[in-house]
Amino acid sequence: MCHEPLRSYQYRFHPPESSAFERCIGFAWCSGCRIYSGTMVHVPRRRILVDALAPLPADDREQLLRKETALLDWLDRHGIGCCGS
């Protein structure tokens, strides 16, 4: 059994003007076991989500968002999502 802390990350998929803006992508994963889960989650419009990928060039960002495991590896390497933050 792995004793690594559970990590999580949520990001907005739809633009603010969309009626689906509150429908977001959410991930939870264990860096040690490499087990993860991803799903659509509801995040209220008023809640601000940190966009960890904002500093990346658009092409790099799009590549990461196309492959869940690559995104989680990138988030791990940058210490994002640690301990449910």
Image (spheres, rainbow, N blue to C red):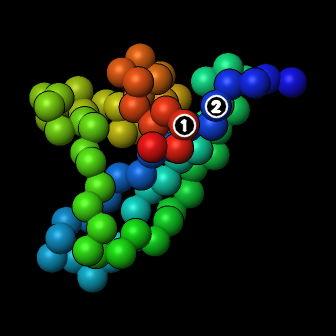
Where residue 14 sits: x, y (%)?
A: 27, 65
| Name of the residue lying farthest toward the bottom | 19
Question: How many neighbours does mark 1 have within 10 angstroms: few (below 14), some (14-19), or many (20 or more)?
Answer: few
Report which quarter residue 64 is drawn in. Answer: top left
Q: Is residue 78 left or right of residue 62?
A: right
Q: Are there few (<14), some (14-19), or many (20+) residues within 10 Å of tag 2?
A: some
Say which residue appears at 35% left-offset and 52% top-offset: 11
Q: Which residue is mark 2?
A: 5
55 left or right of 40? Answer: left
Residue type at numbered disc 2: Pro
**Image quadrant assignment for residue 61:** top left
For the point 53% across and 44% down, the residue is 84
Picture quarter with the C terminus: top left
- Residue 42: horizontal and vertical position, in percent? 46, 71
Q: Secondary structure at mark 2?
A: loop
Which residue is found at the position 40% from the left and 69% from the top? 43
Residue 54's spot in the image, x, y percent? 17, 38
Relative to 79, is 22 above or below?
Answer: below
Q: Which residue is mark 1?
A: 83
Tell me the SS state at disc 1: helix
Q: Is residue 19 above or below residue 5?
A: below
Closest to the observer, 75 or 60: 75
Q: Amino acid type of disc 1?
A: Cys
Answer whether labels 1 and 2 touch (C-beta < 8 Å).
yes
- First of labels 1, 2 by sequence position: 2
Q: Is residue 62 visible?
A: no
Q: Residue at x 36, y 39 (%)?
A: 65
Give whichever of 61, 79 is nearer the camera.
Answer: 79
* Marks 1 and 2, how far apart at CA: 5 Å
Q: Give the farthest residue toward the right.
A: 1
Is residue 33 left or right of 29 when viewed as pictured?
A: right
Q: Nearer the viewer, residue 64 or 46?
A: 46
